[in-house]
Image (spheres, grey):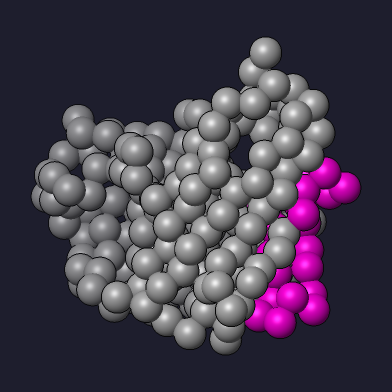
Amino acid sequence: EVQLVESGGGLVQPGGSLRLSCAASGFTFSSYSMNWVRQAPGKGLEWVSYISSSSSTIYYADSVKGRFTISRDNAKNSLYLQMNSLRDEDTAVYYCARPQGGFDYWGQGTLVTVSS
Amino acid sequence: AIRMTQSPSSFSASTGDRVTITCRASQGISSYLAWYQQKPGKAPKLLIYAASTLQSGVPSRFSGSGSGTDFTLTISCLQSEDFATYYCQQYYSYPLYTFGQGTKLEIK
C-alpha cells in the first residue's frame, strides 16, 4: 500500500525557518518525481515545488522561489522541504504528492503556521 | 503561467441530481487535465486524469470530458458522500502545475 506521511509542521515566527519531511513507502520511491502542494486555511490548492527522481530537475512556484528548497534522499525514501524567510502568507497545510497522470497519492498534510 | 478557472465557485444540489462543473484553461492544454475531490480536513483524492480517464476505484457516476481549453466533470446521480469541493488541475505545463480555484458542492 502506497503511503506518504508528512511531518515537521508547527508554529514559527515570521522570518523563521522550518523543514518538512515526507516519508514514502509501498512503492519504488527512487523511480518517481515528487511534489509539494499547499493549502492556506479556507483556500484552494497551490503547487509549491517539484523534484525529479534523481534530483537533477527542480522547479518552484514564484511565490516561494529563493526561500524554499526541495530535496530528497532516495536511500531513506524521503522528501524534504526546507522553508526559510517564512511569511504570514506561507501559513498552510503542506502536502507531498506523487505525480502519475495527475497526483495519484497524497499525504495527510502537515500544518505550518507563521505568526508572531 | 496557465490559469485554470472553474465555474461555478459553489452551488447547491440534491441527492440524485446530475451535476456538471466546468473548468477552463487560459490556453490549450490538450487532455492534460485532472479532477480531484476534497472533503474537509482530508487530502485531495484523484478522480479523473487525462480529462476523461477514471482513476481506479472511483465510482462510474463520475465522468470527465473535454480537450483544449474547456473541460467538464459530471456526477450522474449525486450521492450523499459526493458533497465536497472539487478542483481541476492542468499538467500540460508539467512540472509547473496549476489548479482551479475549486467548486464547493453543497446539499440543497
Q: In which quarter of the image is the N terminus of chain A?
A: bottom left
**Which residue sits at x=13%, y=45%?**
B80
Q: Quadrant of the C terminus of chain A?
A: top right
Report which quarter residue A106 is drawn in. bottom left
Residue A21 x, y percent position in the rendering? 56, 54
Residue B47 x, y percent position in the rendering? 36, 65
Q: Give the range drawn in magenta.
A: A47-69
Tell whether A10 sits left or right of B69: left
**Which residue sits at x=67%, y=33%?**
A90
State whether residue B30 is above or below residue B99.
Answer: below
- Is residue A57 shown in magenta? yes
Tell whether A77 sits left or right of B107: right
Tell whether B65 sits left or right of A98: left
Q: Does any portion of residue A44 appear in the rendered image?
A: no
Between A91 and B107, the one nearer to me in the picture: A91
Q: Which residue lies furthest to the top in this view?
A: A116
**Which residue sits at x=87%, y=47%?**
A66
